[in-house]
Image (spheres, grey):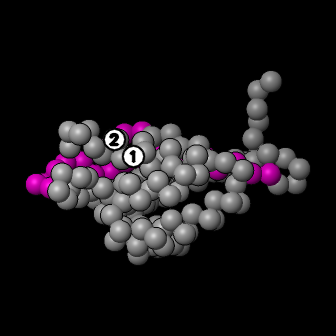
Amino acid sequence: MDKNTLPNHLANHYVRCIDQRCFGELEQIMWPEFSQRGPGFAAESREQFIGNLGMLEHFSHTFHMLGSQFGEWQGGEYRGETYCVASHFYERDGRRWKMDMGICYHDVIVLRDGIGKYLSRDLTLVWQEDRPLEVAQ
């Protein structure tokens, strides 16, 4: 795969794994020493990160929409940002709710033996909104 398309490919694979709850597949796109930090949480390894995803059990499902992506390669290392809106669906008081989060991921991707995977993917929470879900009928 062309390394210039790799950041987009990894970001799409990441959100598919999260939304479809295929957490084991994340091993394909993260190095074992993968880390992630965000507001109120941290994972210091790929194993710990995947284990932490159990917290998504509080939601019936998630839906991630990728937005802009910017970054550059310096040799075998990419540093960039990926913007995303992550929707988390759940029930409260007999109603369906949706918590949306505007996220900026700070990505580091490393090539090893021609294979590119995330080394880290810290996130900044730009905004958050929690409200009842209104579904058009």
> Is residue 11 depicted above or below 57 in this figure?
above
Residue 74 painted magenta? yes
Q: Main secondary structure of the magenta part?
A: strand
Q: Where in the figure is residue 45, as x and y percent of width and height?
A: 40, 73
Is residue 4 visible to the viewer in this orientation of the structure? no
Q: Which residue is mark 2?
A: 8
Q: Which residue is mark 1?
A: 11
| Magenta stretch, residue numbers | 67-91
Question: Looking at the rendered structure, which numbered label has been put on residue 72?
Answer: none
What's the CA distance linking mark 2 and mark 1? 5 Å
On screen, residue 33 versus residue 110, left or right, reads right
Within the image, what quadrant is residue 44 found in?
A: bottom left
Tag 2 and tag 1, C-beta contact below 8 Å? yes
Within the image, what quadrant is residue 118 found in?
A: bottom left
Residue at the farthest left position: 75
Q: Residue at x 70, y 54 (%)?
A: 59
Q: Residue at x 34, y 71 (%)?
A: 33
Q: Where in the figure is residue 101, as x and y percent of width and height?
A: 56, 51
